[in-house]
Amino acid sequence: MIPPVAIEIAVLVLGLVVLMFETFAQQLDKRVVGLVTIVGLIAIFAATFFLAPPPAAMTGPLWNFYAADTIGLVFKRFMIITTIFVLLMMADYAPSVRALVGGATSESGLGEFFTLPIFTCAGLMYLVSAIDLVMIFVSLELVTISFYVLISLTRRNPITLEAGVKYLVLSAMSTGFIVYGITWIFGVTGQTNLQRIATALAASSADQSAALFGVLLVIVGLGFKIAAVPFQIWVPDVYQGAPTPVTAFLSVGSKAAGFVVLLRILQPFLVLPNIGRLLIFIALLTLIYGNLAALPQTNFKRLLGYSSIAHAGYLLVGVACFDGPAVTFYLFAYLLMTLLSFAVLVIVAQQTGERIEDFDGLAERSPFLAFAMLMAMASLAGVPLTAGFFGKFLIFMAAIAQRQTALIVAGAIGVACGFYYYLKIVRAMYWQPAANAERIPVSGLSRLAMTILIIGIVWLGVYPSTVLNALKSKDRPVMLSAGEQTLNR
């Protein structure tokens, strides 16, 4: 049996080995590095099913920072799966990297392009298991620095450089909010461990006003990470300027880790006044802004950027209603449908472009890619029998259970808007004539990856219990009470 802490260590060791290998293999096609990394991550993913149970009495320095619980394990697998599919996209995107990086050889930049996602994955895995504010901060910085390099990698593209600078500056500002908030929380409680903070806040002597100010600062910092309004200003430009596989990684992996951290951090502070009202207000703003701003978009990556804000709004509805299972299921559905849409975009954009009109007549040029995008858009919009539909269903059920009428109305308006701007892509693919009749080739590996994502979308739409049952455990520190009825159905 493998100790739980060995999984992140294995990912870090894999990253170091691959980095050393690609450094000295000068003449090697660096896409081989990506394939080796994928094989290594698949082996690590398989190893997660053979973990030893955590010790009954989790005492000692390690367990003050690290939680070997069910939700952490579920999201470690989530991060590994996300990284594998992103690396597959990167293999398709390699020609664009060769053209836009520049360097002594045609392979310059590709090694780092395939290696950095491993360290990002390790940071995300540490982040979802962290139960100490210091550990959360360190993990977040590992993820942020890795993403900054990945976003700015294609340095010959001025849009990419602009995206990298915006991400760097605003991430640094959000980090400042988080650190300042941690300082206030430590000043009030004398603790950074979340469980001990809960105990300290339960004492009548705790200064709740100062603790509330501290957690508000932390929520502001995390709001930048999850693209919640009004902290979303970086999203459209960074999503458009970053290399497309990096945008997919940023959209799925970073958002999922951010919401897991948000759920963990909120748990000790639920005793404070007005936390719920604040979350409801942010969820309303995020839902309305994200959906309305996506309506006029003509660039597909910008549309997905605003769409990501809208989906953060749906997830915040689940958080505001304290329904962990609904949030978790929605994140898994979002993983499948977002990665599928970006996987198609990577291939189409290299031949035509990233605008919506570049998808005109895609059904004639590549029926498989058009069908894959159709499934992604249908799930993102919430068409029945897709993972996206059941994810939205759980979110609305949570809002109904808490009698949050404003959230239900805003969510319904958002769904209506989503059908309009997602089906614009379907209209372009199936009803508009193709400006270019040249067929778009799809590699066998990419076809296999997209097929798996399509099956996953349908499977979770028909059998949602696949994810919900995996969350049933005695240790559910972020499975909050309002979600229990949904989970037990």
Image (spheres, rainbow, N blue to C red):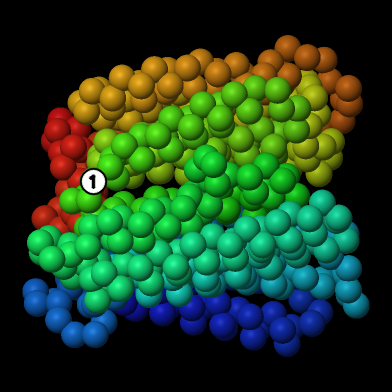
Q: Residue at x 36, y 61 (%)?
A: 214
Q: Is residue 184 above or below residue 478?
A: below
Given residues 484 and 343, the one toward you in this image is: 484
For this view, does 226 lie left or right of residue 276? right
Which of the 4 quarters of the picture holds residue 88? bottom right
Q: Residue at x 77, y 76 (%)?
A: 28
Q: Position of residue 44 (x, y in %)?
A: 41, 69
- Residue 273 in sight from this viewpoint: yes
Q: Position of residue 139 (x, y in %)?
A: 45, 71
With 399 as the anchor, is 97 left or right in this view?
Answer: right
Which part of the image, by quadrant, shows the N terminus?
A: bottom left
222 vs 251, left or right, is: left
Please state which of residues 440 and 268 is positioned toward the viewer in this rendering: 268
**Residue 80 higher or lower than 363, as above or below:** below
Amino acid at circle 1 = Pro
Q: Residue at x 16, y 42 (%)?
A: 481
Report how many numbered discs are placed on residues in the image: 1
Residue 92 versus residue 194 in the image, above or below: above
Residue at 35% over, 34% down: 280
Percent position of residue 320, x then y: 31, 38
Question: Is residue 452 positioned above or below 478 on the image?
Answer: above
Res. 325 visible in picture = no
Q: In the rendered view of the protein, which quadrant contains the C terminus?
A: top left
Element on which disc 1 rests: loop
Residue 148 horizontal/vertical position (percent): 66, 65
Residue beneath disc 1: 273
